[in-house]
Image (cartoon, grey):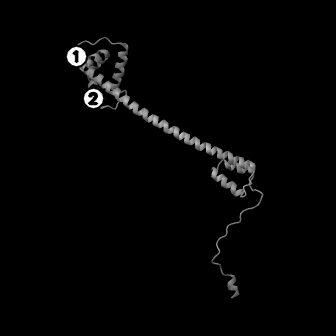
Amino acid sequence: MNNSRKWKISRGGGERLPPVLTSEKNFLPDDTILHLSEYLSFSDFRNFVSSLWPREDECPRVVRTQVRTLQSLKCWRTHRKLKLRCVRQQQQLKQSEDHVNKRQRKRQIDSDNVLIEALKMRLNDKQQPLPLLDEDKSFLLSLVSKIRGDAKGDNTSYKKYKATLMHNDKALKYLQQVSVLKVLINLNNHL
């Protein structure tokens, strides 16, 4: 019976953890530890150093690296917050500019539609148009390019007037001759 007691397995014993290394000499050189600091996050590096030096008596070079890393981490966090704040402000400005630009584009489209309507009314008149001024020519060329679809417009009336004016030779000739000033005067008379 004595032999059976020797071979019994104790039920209460679990696995034991390996003992903590308490040697005063470090197995890794300082340069290797400092090199590892470049690849580890600050918390991982701090845990790594505390595992190597449990009494917190690490060498001064490692302490300086920890302090420098912590300072750069704080600077990175504040820089990131500032950068996020600047990006948000830029997005808000861009959204407000887009809103203003949409209003301006809508006004421009409305004014172009009024001019097209005036040109259409003027086509029905039998009067001779006034001679063109240089600024009128450039404006009419830009208007014709908008009608032809060179400029992007999301208004459906552009498509409607494009269809009527592109197939109407008389309208295109008139666009080349008519004075914008005369059209505006004519438009004011009709209003």
CA gap, disc 2 to disc 1?
21 Å
Q: Residues within 10 Å of mark 1 (few under 14, many from 20)?
A: few
CB atoms of marks 2 and 1 within 8 Å: no
Q: Is residue 17 left or right of residue 79?
A: right
Q: Quadrant of residue 148?
A: top left
- How many marks are shown on the rendered structure? 2
Give the label on residue 125, or none: 1
User: In the structure shown, which secondary structural element does the residue marked by tag 1 occupy?
Assistant: loop
- Which label's residue is closer to the chain start, 2 or 1? 1
Where residue 109 appears, x then y in whole percent?
A: 33, 27
Of residues 37 and 95, the one drawn nearer to the viewer in this rendering = 95
Residue type highlighted by circle 2: Lys
Q: Quadrant of residue 128?
A: top left
Where residue 135 appears, x then y in whole percent?
A: 37, 15
Q: Residues within 10 Å of mark 2 (few under 14, many from 20)?
A: few
Q: Is residue 70 left or right of residue 153?
A: right
Residue type highlighted by circle 1: Asp
Residue at x-position 69% and y-position 54%: 49
- The quadrant of the picture occupied by the C terminus is top left
Where residue 108 appears, x then y in whole percent?
A: 35, 26
**In the image, which is nearer the foreground, mark 2 or mark 1?**
1
Residue labelled with disc 2: 160
Residue farthest to the right?
Answer: 25
Residue at x-position 29% and y-position 11%: 130
Q: Is residue 173 visible?
A: no
User: In the structure shown, which secondary structural element does the residue marked by tag 2 occupy?
Assistant: helix
Of residues 29 and 181, the one drawn nearer to the viewer in this rendering = 181
- The quadrant of the picture occupied by the N terminus is bottom right
